[in-house]
Amino acid sequence: FLPSLKMFRTLVTRAARPFAPLGDRILVQRAVKETQTASGISLPSSAADKDSNEGTVIAVGPGILDANGTLHAPKVAAGDAVLPPEYG
């Protein structure tokens, strides 16, 4: 099965489009867990297996409207370092 040129262009366009969170949603990329400290000490595998709660904001939604029609924009911006909750 070979996709047609039109189908191929559609797939490439969709893949290249950046993520755009809606409402008050925030897209966060988790930081990579380091296996070695700054002083050169290697961490055991049990410490490296635990997920990191640190992350970087990739994209921010425009905000959410309240009952009066006032827009409440998130206070974070793309590039900020954040500590997201463990679940959610």
Image (tube, rainbow, N blue to C red):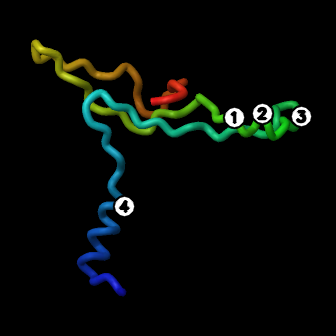
- Badge 4 marks a residue whose secondary structure is helix
Q: Residue at x 47, y 36 (%)?
A: 28
In the picture as drawn, the residue positioned furthest to the left comes out as 68
Report helix, strand or loop for mark 3: loop
Image quadrant in which the N terminus is located: bottom left
Observer-side mark, 4 or 2, equals: 2
Name the amino acid type tagged 4: Ala
* Mark 1 or mark 3, earlier in chain: 3
Which residue lies under the disc numbered 2? 47
| Percent position of residue 49, x then y | 72, 39
Q: Residues within 10 Å of mark 1 (few under 14, many from 20)?
A: few
| Contact flag, marks 2 and 1 (Cβ < 8 Å) | yes
Q: Are marks 3 and 4 in contact (CB under 8 Å)?
A: no
The answer to whether the residues at label 1 and label 3 have Cβ atoms under 8 Å apart is: no
Separation of residues labelled 2 and 1 (CA atoms): 6 Å
Residue 41's label in the rendered image is 3
Write the residue at 85% across / 37% down.
44
What's the residue type where badge 3 is placed? Ile
Residue appearing at x 30%, y 33% in the figure: 61
Q: Which mark is residue 15?
A: 4
Between label 1 and label 3, give the one nearer the viewer.
1
Task: Name the amino acid, label 2.
Answer: Ala
Under circle 2, the secondary element is: helix
Report x, y in % for residue 21: 31, 38
First in sequence, mark 2 or 3: give its number. Answer: 3
